[in-house]
Amino acid sequence: MRKIILLCIFALLICACNKEKAPTLSASDEDNRQPETFEEFMNSIDKDREYTIGSSRDGYTTYQNHYLSRDLKPRYENDKEYMAEYMAEFKKEQKRDSLVDINAEYIINKYKKTAAKAYQYESHVDGDSVECILALRMVKDSLNKEKLTGQLSEDFYYYPDCFIYRRYISEWDGYGGTKFADMRHDLFYKHLIEVPNKQKTDSEATKQLVKDYIGKQKGVKKLNVSYVYDEGFATPYDQCIVVSFSRNINALSRSSVKGTRYLISAKSKEEYLKILNELWALFSDHVKNNYSEVDGHWGFECKKSMDLDTLRYDNRNDAMQMTIVKDKETGEMFHVQVGYDNNGVHLLLLNIETKRFYIPANWMRIVSIHNDIEEWESDDNKYSTSTIWGRTGFAKVKVVGRKMK
């Protein structure tokens, strides 16, 4: 009996010693912990990023894009006031980029051996370029197999899961012999989640879903909007937020976008976040559980461009969006754009009738556009006369008032 008691005491002492030796993570250690999954890696970079959910008949695909860029050398060193603020941000970005490179190398090495295909490229001529692409699973469906070229640098998009890491460093001479250098990271992660028994939907059902949500809100204001460019008028790309999803569109072909803008009033940060989170849940659940018949692999998606736990800016015109294609050949689609300003959360419900289309960056204020004439909603803000490129060159834009009701 005495021997058993001694053995128990000895075992307890060993457990106590091991417990004392167990490491504890500080807050800073936890922040610098190397991610074990690609989701963790993408989420650790910066919460204010682009996150997209695309629907297909067999499931839904999540996309995460991230672009980081910074100067490698301090600029305008003669301006002391500017440099104090600049250097603080410079050191912060320098630490971030270093951590991105360390974690990227770690996670690439972890999954490279088990990836279905891998591609790496490195060049140090006239700068510094590094690229790594991992196709994590093989392509199964015949539609995507037909699109493969055999070059992973071009085929990555057709694989169900893939990860891309790119880093570019370049230097050039500026005015007065000034040396400039910058670095850019391009990061992309795609992941397919299979969902059995997905339901077919169409643009009208999607439109009604959003309208039902709006109908449940109190004190909503609305206004009909129209953005039309006849054939021969070029889209002012520098003033737009969304341009045609289709590539190789004639820049002078007709563009027609019509719909309704709604304003849901919000006073506090909590009210803004409640509305934005509800809309994202509505959009993402609808896309995850439904698919569009137009194209089994693209034609129905939603996207957010911010972290919905915070409000990073006073106003934002691209907080989130949802799009469903009606007709791939004609370009017809239904599109919802969500933004917010100090008046509340704006929803722009649009019927797009042409492959070429344009949503103005100031859509939360603009009522209509027809070629070289803009009509703005009337409010306390003062707008100066702007110009856009028209059929005969620069054309003045007329600004008139009309309020939401």
Image (cartoon, rainbow, N blue to C red):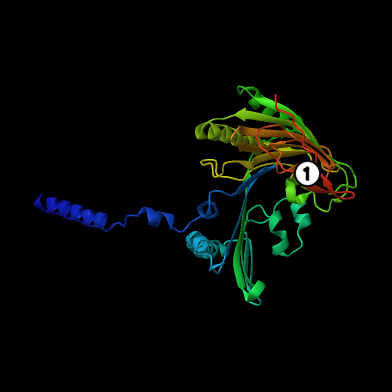
Q: Residue at x 40, y 54 (%)?
A: 30
Quadrant in which the C terminus appears = top right
| Image coords of residue 268 (percent x, y) | 51, 32
Q: Is residue 229 left or right of residue 207?
A: right
Q: Residue at x 61, y 37 (%)?
A: 340
> As shown in the figure, which amino acid type bears the numbered disc 1?
Tyr
Q: Is residue 314 left or right of residue 390?
A: left
Q: Is residue 106 visible?
A: no
Q: Is residue 384 left or right of residue 115?
A: right
Residue 347 vs residue 45, the one in the foreground: 347
Outermost residue on the left side: it is 2
SS for dot 1: strand
Residue 212 vs residue 152, the one in the foreground: 212
| Image coords of residue 128 (percent x, y) | 62, 72
Q: Is residue 157 left or right of residue 311?
A: right
* Displayed quadrant of residue 198: top right
| Image coords of residue 338 (percent x, y) | 65, 37
Q: Residue at x 75, y 59 (%)?
A: 148
Q: Is residue 150 visible?
A: yes
